[in-house]
């Protein structure tokens, strides 16, 4: 079917290669095909970690084979490319920034090789290097194209099968076809579809194809466009549309040039495919939001994905550069800077408690994590890449060379543009780096750039040193693989621990499995989980009856001491993560009601450490308030609650605790009067109206509660807790249809909440929302819904 393409594409390599080079290339091609589909069938192994694992194994095995090949032939050929030098500059910047990072472990490899750690960048630079070394043959490059195309077809087939058949199709407990694609997100699938559409379009328009090949690529183009329509990502449509426009203009310019010079064209003259893609791109780019909403609603696709805006990301860059200008905050530490410098207005949004790991795009994120030097290295890389691509495009001669230059350059511009405006997952970023290496190999093979050749077989001393270096690299590769396997085993035990603790309540098994996980890999996540196990063991200890007091005291001291030590270990692993400090605070706070000496002071100090790292969190301020109340300082606790409400005026948890204080003090009516005055002065403060509604509900003034809660919902329609009590108020007033309507509205925004579904069923059956209560009780310990 592709015989004519391979004939056109047959190009010699720059040097003889060994069979180990071929094996390495086949492994990379196979991995590229599998990467979009690859997952590990345990929910604890997230998609990013599974794909990072595949990338690591691919790079290590291919690199091992390449080293063996160099030992066999005794020759090393490296393209003299500024693009390759720029990649090394990026890697060097990440390395220095990692050593200067306040959390070396988090910056070096993170918990699961997160995209943006030094290890992830090293793997990506190495896959680019291997692409430059192994993909000199255009036949091999076209094989990679076919592998990517086949991968996209399989993704579409499996995605449809997963959506139709559900979890019965795969034994993957954590996969939700309505929430994510096999690449990670629906937008990742859209970008992959756009990339495939671009490749198919260039192939159709730039190569003379036989009927079968032409039919195949038209089919791929239609499938990719259909996937883009379903996923409807404006960025993918926009970049694809730009390239479709370039193809249209270029093809028509060829026609005019040929007519002027009386020459015949070897390919079809009218760009039907490019015009179709251009028109669809314009349509869906301009009307993307409206069409996306209609398509997502029809197909029940949940495409909600939130990232900081350009303005928000720029603010984080400015704040970070004031303190860490040259090398940034440290790889993989964007979240710490987000918590320090995010705008106060974020607390008024639905995502006030979201700890963003990235900015608006992947490359802008690196401006925060690696500083000015990292940004300059990235700009140098992109500048040299696009400069070389543009020169090669105009210098290409024959049809096949022109096709490969334009297709590679087009795909690279597409993928690297995506990393500027979005945060793609591992598959697309891997493709960007791998194709960059392939582009360098093509430039060297066509002699657009020079090649540095080195043979160490002529001089025994040089040969000895080189062989020693290659053997050291071989050993280093094997050792790296050993550490990768250790991390996989650690996460396997962590998965076992989670299942035992959360699903079966088997504390002993969870303790054992987490202990094994820490033996294979130390991570703050594992230590925090062990703290939860210790607190559960303490709770169980106090629930046991008939224990000797001395045994109880000894066992408690052991468990509490272990919990404190584990919390400290988590902080040592990553002192920049406020969650680790909060875990320590939680450990001591649990003992404050028992009046353990020093528990209050230690909890307060730990909360102070958490607030230093997350100063705008109303949740941490409320935890300080709860600590003061547990310590008996209710007035100090009230001050802290007011401080939390100053950060987020509709913070339900704080409102609940404040209402409880008013009720316990017997001052509900007085509090209502003060709040009504505040509501008069601040008629758009939903939190004030919610608190009025709660207090009036508690004193059974249901009519007044309904008015206040209605106003809270009018101000913020998605205020779920206000709707919850508005529904209960309507039930207390006998307005059952209105109560049902409120809970149905909650169910739409909280689809996984089974309690809401049960309440709706009972209301429709003419029963009370709560079987054990008449529907008028108010539990103010915590709000019923998390917001």
Image (cartoon, grey):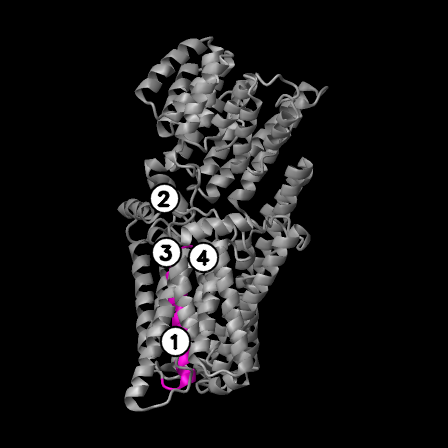
Viewer-proximal residue among 598 and 636:
636
| Residue pictured at 43% horizontal, 15% vertical | 633
Work out whether mark 2 precedes mark 3 in sequence or the reverse, and give the earlier one: 3
Work out whether mark 3 precedes mark 4 in sequence or the reverse, and give the earlier one: 3
Residue highlighted by disc 3: 286
Viewer-proximal residue among 477 and 431:
431
Mark 1 to mark 4 CA distance (whole Å): 23 Å
Secondary structure under the numbered disc 1 in the rendered image: helix
10 Å crowding of disc 3: few (<14), some (14-19), many (20+): some
State whether residue 578 is above or below residue 782: below
Work out whether mark 4 precedes mark 2 in sequence or the reverse, and give the earlier one: 2
> Is residue 410 magenta-colored?
yes
Mark 1 to mark 3 CA distance (whole Å): 27 Å
Front tag of 1 and 4? 1
Secondary structure under the numbered disc 2 in the rendered image: helix
| Residue pictured at 36% horizontal, 73% vertical | 248
Please tell me the numbered disc located at residue 406: 1
Residue highlighted by disc 4: 424
Left or right placement of residue 109 versus residue 673 in this view: right
């Amino acid at each position: 079917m592709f015989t004519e393409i391979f004939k056109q594409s047959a190009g010699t390599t720059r040097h003889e290669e060994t069979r180990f080079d071929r094996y390495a290339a086949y492994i990379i091609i196979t991995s590229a095909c599998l990467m979009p589909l690859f997952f590990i069938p345990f929910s604890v192994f997230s998609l990013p970690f599974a794909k990072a694992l595949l990338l690591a194994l691919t790079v290590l095995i291919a690199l091992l084979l390449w080293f063996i090949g160099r030992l066999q032939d005794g020759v090393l050929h490296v393209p003299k490319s500024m693009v390759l030098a720029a990649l090394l500059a990026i890697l060097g910047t990440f390395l220095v920034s990692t050593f200067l990072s306040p959390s070396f472990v988090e910056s070096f490899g993170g918990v699961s090789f997160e995209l943006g750690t030094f290890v992830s960048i090293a793997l990506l630079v190495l896959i680019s290097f291997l692409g430059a070394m192994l993909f000199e043959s255009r036949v091999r490059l076209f094989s990679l194209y076919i592998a990517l195309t086949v991968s996209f077809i399989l993704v579409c087939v499996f995605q449809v099968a997963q959506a139709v058949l559900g979890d019965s199709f795969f034994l993957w407990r954590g996969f939700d076809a309505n929430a994510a694609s096999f690449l990670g997100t629906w937008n990742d699938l859209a970008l992959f579809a756009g990339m495939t559409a671009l490749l198919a379009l260039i192939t159709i328009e730039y190569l003379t194809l036989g009927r079968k090949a032409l039919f195949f690529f038209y089919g791929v183009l239609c499938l990719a466009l259909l996937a883009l329509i379903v996923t409807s990502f404006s960025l993918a449509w926009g970049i694809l549309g730009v390239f479709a426009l370039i193809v249209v203009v270029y093809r028509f310019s060829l026609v005019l040039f040929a007519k002027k010079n009386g020459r015949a064209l070897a390919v079809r003259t009218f760009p039907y495919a490019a015009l179709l893609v251009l028109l669809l791109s314009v349509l869906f780019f301009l009307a993307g939001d409206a069409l996306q909403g209609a398509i997502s609603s029809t197909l029940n696709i949940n495409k909600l994905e939130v990232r900081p805006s350009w303005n928000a990301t720029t603010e984080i860059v400015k704040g970070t550069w004031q303190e860490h200008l040259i090398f940034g905050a440290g790889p993989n530490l964007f979240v710490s800077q987000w918590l320090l410098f995010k705008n106060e207005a974020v607390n008024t949004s639905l995502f006030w408690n979201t700890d963003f790991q990235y900015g608006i795009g992947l490359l802008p994120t690196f401006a925060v994590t690696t500083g000015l030097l990292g940004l300059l290295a990235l700009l140098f890389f992109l500048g040299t890449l696009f400069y070389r691509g543009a020169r090669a495009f105009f210098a290409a001669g024959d049809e096949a060379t022109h096709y490969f230059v334009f297709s590679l350059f087009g795909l690279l511009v597409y993928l690297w543009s995506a990393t500027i405006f979005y945060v793609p997952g591992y598959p697309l970023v891997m493709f960007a780096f791998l194709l960059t290496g392939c582009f360098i190999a093509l430039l060297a093979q066509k002699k657009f750039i020079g090649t540095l050749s080195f043979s160490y077989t002529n001089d025994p001393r040089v040969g000895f040193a080189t062989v020693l270096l290659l053997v050291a690299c071989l050993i280093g590769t094997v050792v790296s693989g050993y550490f990768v396997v250790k991390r996989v085993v650690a996460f396997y035990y962590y998965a076992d621990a989670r299942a035992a603790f959360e699903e079966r309540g088997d504390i002993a098994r969870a303790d054992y499995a987490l202990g094994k996980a820490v033996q294979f890999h130390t991570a703050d996540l594992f230590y925090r989980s062990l703290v939860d196990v210790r607190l559960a063991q303490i709770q169980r200890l106090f629930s046991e009856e008939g224990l000797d007091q001395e045994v109880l005291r000894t066992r408690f001291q052991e468990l509490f001491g272990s919990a404190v030590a584990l919390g400290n270990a988590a902080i040592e692993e990553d002192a920049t993560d406020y969650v680790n400090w909060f875990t320590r605070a939680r450990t001591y706070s649990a003992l404050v009601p028992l009046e353990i000496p020093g528990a209050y002071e230690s909890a307060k100090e730990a909360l102070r450490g958490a607030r230093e790292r997350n100063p705008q969190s109303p949740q941490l301020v409320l935890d300080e308030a709860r600590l003061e109340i547990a310590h008996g300082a209710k007035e100090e606790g009230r001050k802290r609650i007011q401080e939390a409400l100053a950060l987020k005026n509709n913070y339900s948890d704080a409102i609940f605790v404040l209402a409880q204080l008013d009720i316990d003090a017997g001052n509900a009516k007085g509090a209502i009067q003060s709040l009504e005055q505040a509501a008069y002065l601040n008629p758009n403060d939903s939190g004030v109206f919610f608190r009025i509604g709660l207090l009036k509900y508690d004193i059974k003034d249901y009519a007044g509660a309904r008015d206040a809660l209605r106003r809270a919902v009018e101000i913020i329609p998605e205020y779920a807790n206000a709707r919850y009590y508005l529904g209960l108020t309507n039930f207390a007033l006998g307005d059952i249809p209105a109560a049902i309507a409120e809970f149905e509205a909650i169910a739409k925004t909280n689809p996984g909440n089974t309690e809401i579904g049960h309440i709706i069923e009972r209301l429709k059956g003419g029963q009370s929302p709560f079987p054990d209560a008449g529907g008028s009780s108010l539990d103010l310990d915590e709000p019923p819904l998390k917001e």
